[in-house]
Amino acid sequence: MPMTITEKVLAAAAGKEGVKPGELINAKVDLVLANDITGPVAIKEFAKIGRAKVWDKDRVALVPDHFTPNKDIKSAEQAKLVRDFAHAQELTNYFEVGRMGIEHCLLPEQGLVGPGDVIIGADSHTCTYGALGAFATGVGSTDLAAAMALGETWFKVPESMKFVFNGKLSNYVGGKDLILYTIGKIGVDGALYKAMEFCGEAIRQLSMDGRLTMCNMAIEAGGKNGIIQPDEITRQYVEGRTKRPYTFFTSDPAAQYSEVFEFNVADIEPQVAFPHLPENARPVSQAGHVDIDQAVIGSCTNGRMEDLRLAAEVLQGKKVHKRVRLVIIPGTQEIYRQAMREGLFEIFLDAGAVVSTPTCGPCLGGHMGILAKGERCISTTNRNFVGRMGHPESEVYLANPAVTAASAVTGHISHPGEVL
């Protein structure tokens, strides 16, 4: 029977010849992960199961990244619970402050996720790893606890939607713009419990960093997962990096999709999502004059090397506007180190930005850049809900790193061309 890539990955994990949308399956997982917010709940639920040890100490990853370095006593207690469990279980993949990163930047970098994998995480942006041709999705902490004990979990096989991006990308248009544009077209519930399969000429030209950004925000459209068929760019990324054998699955030509969308990327310019939903996307040329107080470049969406290089290109020789605070957060320690080697920190600091250790920080209103009442922030993060980054009467605008950097310079939402 013809199958999509998502269906093939799930069929293999379930030990079945084929699966179809709506079918309930039990599937073996290749990796489970949690962070300092969701991990404590999963650990407490795991204790109720009565198992002394997790099913495989090499396949459970714990990454304290949301409130770390700890911002207060409560977050320190959460991180300690995760730390103590990781040491007691002798987990191979526990990542402490100074050796960690934002989980969805860190795991691909460390080769812990790969093509053909089934990955679940107690974090909604686990869908990021679909960029490698994996089935990756977020689950609740209780489901994660069961998977830590058993090494498997259940799924309802999702229907698949196909998004075909034709043509060549314009300057300063990347994965963030493609996914914001897509969400703007279908809405935040337009892919509810469906697999979002991204393909076409523009996707084949997209770097791995750009692909990770796109799949990261599938959840913002309600998607069960985002996924891109692996190709030569995938192979170059995973060879010598991925720690387990991997499989390249592809969709059959006759595979069935609930819907197919085709876009000409030449018509897409840098996007800005206005408050208070990612679906409120519009071209930056139609943003009007929106003054900002803060700009954030980082997060599991746009904290990778390509993002920092793009920001540095815009900020080179410029100064952050006197009314604006620019916070830059590399996604991992290795990205931090590489950016330092390349002299990007000099550019950022000369411009008047602050550079943080890797952390989710301001993305979820945690720390490192909380907004006060009435303040506006343009950010490369993934959500702009009411109160997401601080006071419920603050505003968050989502954009790519180039737009965010340019806006930090002008003091209002701007196209990079305004400062270059």
Image (cartoon, rainbow, N blue to C red):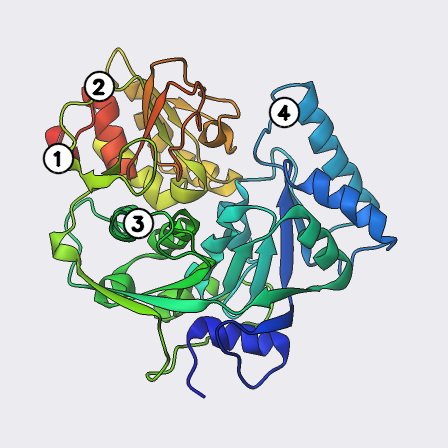
Look at the image and tell me whether residue 7 can be seen: yes
Q: Earlier in the sequence, mark 2 or mark 1?
A: 1
Q: Earlier in the sequence, mark 1 or mark 3?
A: 3
Residue at 34% from the left image edge and 84% from the top image edge: 254
- Neighbor class of circle 3 (other Cα within 10 Å; few <14, some 14-19, many 20+) is many
From the top left corner, tell me how far across and down residue 317 is, in percent: 21, 24
Q: Secondary structure at mark 1?
A: helix
Give the labeled residue for mark 3: 183
- Mark 3 or 4: in front is 3
Q: Where, by quadrant of the figure, is residue 75 drawn?
A: top right
Amino acid identity at mark 4? Asn
Q: Are marks 2 and 4 in contact (CB under 8 Å)?
A: no
Amino acid identity at mark 2? Asp
- Mark 2 or 3: in front is 3
Q: Earlier in the sequence, mark 2 or mark 4?
A: 4
Give the labeled residue for mark 4: 70
- Mark 1 or 4: in front is 1
Q: Earlier in the sequence, mark 3 or mark 4?
A: 4
Q: Secondary structure at mark 3?
A: helix
Task: State which quarter of the image contains the N terminus.
Answer: bottom left
**In 3D space, how far apart are the residues under numbered discs 2 and 1 (Cα atoms)?**
14 Å
Q: Secondary structure at mark 4?
A: loop
Give the labeled residue for mark 1: 286
Give the labeled residue for mark 2: 291
**In 3D space, how far apart are the residues under numbered discs 3 and 4 (Cα atoms)?**
33 Å
